[in-house]
Image (cartoon, rainbow, N blue to C red):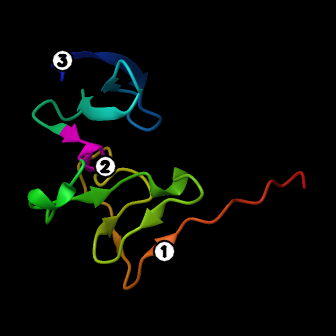
Amino acid sequence: MAFYGVVAKRYDHQSDSSRRRVTLNFCGKCGTTICLDLERFADILGLCGGTFDDPNWFDRSQCRHIFTRSAQAGVVLPAGVELYQEHALLLDGTPSQPTVLAHALMVARRQDPRE
């Protein structure tokens, strides 16, 4: 896979919950994650909307944020979008319950229990 002459690289990771393969496809030059290939959902390719210069050109009504429990400090969780602490689907296929914020929220720095 190549983007603008830069060869994409791959990193295979084992999911913490399903123990299945998650492949991160990223730019071989800058390291930006471009898309995810999920063994658990073989028919789905997860595009990372933040990689687009202008993400407003595509319909984002089906967008959602997953694994918000591990979001880095400073990440802004948007209002009106489904947010999931982990996967949107449980291992048995049951939908997880999303949170939808009325106002955007910035993830705060977590306190280190050793401090």
Residue 62 % position (x, y): 15, 60
SS category of the residue bearing label 3: strand
Q: Amino acid at mark 3?
A: Ala
Residue under circle 3?
Answer: 2
Q: Name the amino acid, label 1.
A: Leu
* 100 vs 41, nearest the viewer: 100
Residue 82, disc: none
Residue 101 percent location from the top left of the image: 38, 79
- Residue located 21% across and 59% down the image: 63
Identity of the residue drawn at 18% across and 17% down: 2
For the residue marked with disc 2, what is the amino acid? Answer: Gly
Residue 10 placement: quadrant: top left
Q: Between marks 3 and 1, how big is the CA–CA gap? A: 35 Å
Label drawn at residue 50: 2
Q: Position of residue 52 (x, y in %)?
A: 23, 46
Judged from this view, the residue extending furthest toward the bottom is: 102
Is 100 placed left or right of 95 in the picture? right
Q: Is residue 95 visible?
A: no
Report the residue at 52% width, 69% height from top: 106
Residue 49 covered by magenta stretch = yes
Give the quadrant of residue 14. Answer: top left
Q: Is residue 64 above or below residue 7?
A: below
Q: Quadrant of the C terminus?
A: bottom right
Q: Which residue is mark 1?
A: 105
Left or right: residue 12 versus residue 69 is left
Magenta residues, start to end: 46-52
Viewer-nearest of discs 3 and 1: 3
Residue 75 among those drawn in magenta = no
Q: Residue at x 32, y 16 (%)?
A: 9
- Disc 3 from disc 2: Cα separation: 18 Å
Q: Earlier in the sequence, mark 3 or mark 2?
A: 3
